[in-house]
Image (tube, rainbow, N blue to C red):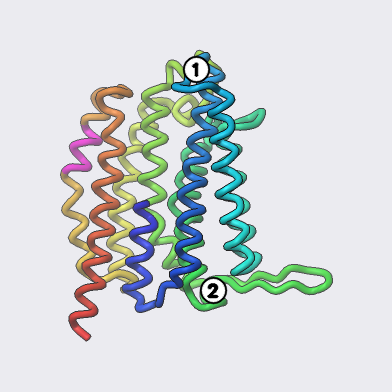
Amino acid sequence: MFPFIVITGYLLYMEQAIDVKLTSIFFAGMFLFDLTTTSINNYIDTKTNGMPLPFSRKFAFTVLCLLLIASTTLGMWLVALTDVIVLILGGLCFAAGVLYTYGPVPISRQPWGELVSGTFYGLVIPFILLYINMPKGYYISAGMSEHALHIDVQIAPMVAVLLLSVSPVCCTANIMLANNISDLEKDILVKRHTLPYYIGIPHALNLFAGLYYITYASTIALVATRILHPVSLLTLATIHPVRQNVAAFRKLQDKETTFPASIQNYIIIMSAMALAIWTSVFITRLCV
């Protein structure tokens, strides 16, 4: 939801008209598929760990399938209205969502879970929203001949997308990182070897803190390159509460008491980013 709010604000800040039909289809498909991935995750984890569900597993599986069918239908509808780029990116999103928990080697049990979750939630999904609303060829143009598929990437617009995605990528990755740090001992018992298992708790905690500071560096870069309005620098005021949450998590890595700090930091940073961008929209409109 937060990347969606940020990107719609950014489109308005760029004075780009939003295609309501495409955006609505995308939002519904994105929302339902997020529920699908959560359902798959809960269904498989409870089955693996022998945990009960609040209703029968048969009913849970039916709900899971209905969500998957609905989100897939919306996704294919969006592809039919756009092009092959949306098909490729959407297909990758679906593959990552399903393979996150399902399969012989689930992503959630590997050391690259943070990278995958952060990249897809923070970069790929926002990029699709930008792509379907910007003029054709603004970011990527594709052509197909008898022998090859040609894809041309516009460097400057893509750099802007990458900088915009830094905050949602890092904040999303940190939620999973904090979760894996808190669950490390339990994960080892069930042969779940996540990133903290390989790099150790001290390095994982340094990474946890560092990713937040990278988000602030990206904000400065966005303003310096005039991608965002200078009012976005006000988001730097959130450093203090974020640092307090990081310090609390450094002292104790507990799922019940300190893990929520990662969620709080996500909300703090992304809310500030969304507020700054939407404020920029109103400022620029008033100055016209």
Segment tinted magenta in the rendering: 241-247
Q: Main secondary structure of the magenta part?
A: helix
Q: Amino acid at mark 1?
A: Ile
Quadrant where the C terminus is found in the figure? bottom left
Is residue 84 placed above or below 46 in the rendered structure?
A: below
Is residue 204 placed above or below 127 in the rendered structure?
A: above
The residue depicted at 47 percent of the width and 71 percent of the height is: 133
Q: CA distance from mark 1 to mark 2?
A: 44 Å
The residue depicted at 54 percent of the width and 35 percent of the height is: 63
Q: Nearer the viewer, residue 158 or 60?
A: 60
Q: Amino acid at mark 2?
A: Gln
Give how far across and how far down residue 141 sits, in percent.
61, 73
Report whether residue 74 is seen: yes
Q: How many marks?
A: 2
Element on which disc 1 rests? helix
Give how far across and how far down residue 168 sits, in percent.
38, 51
Q: Which mark is residue 2?
A: none
Residue bearing the label numbered 1? 188
Give how far across and how far down residue 102 sits, in percent.
61, 32
Element on which disc 2 rests? loop
Q: Is residue 242 magenta?
A: yes
In the rendered image, which quarter is residue 226 located in?
bottom left
Residue bearing the label numbered 2? 154
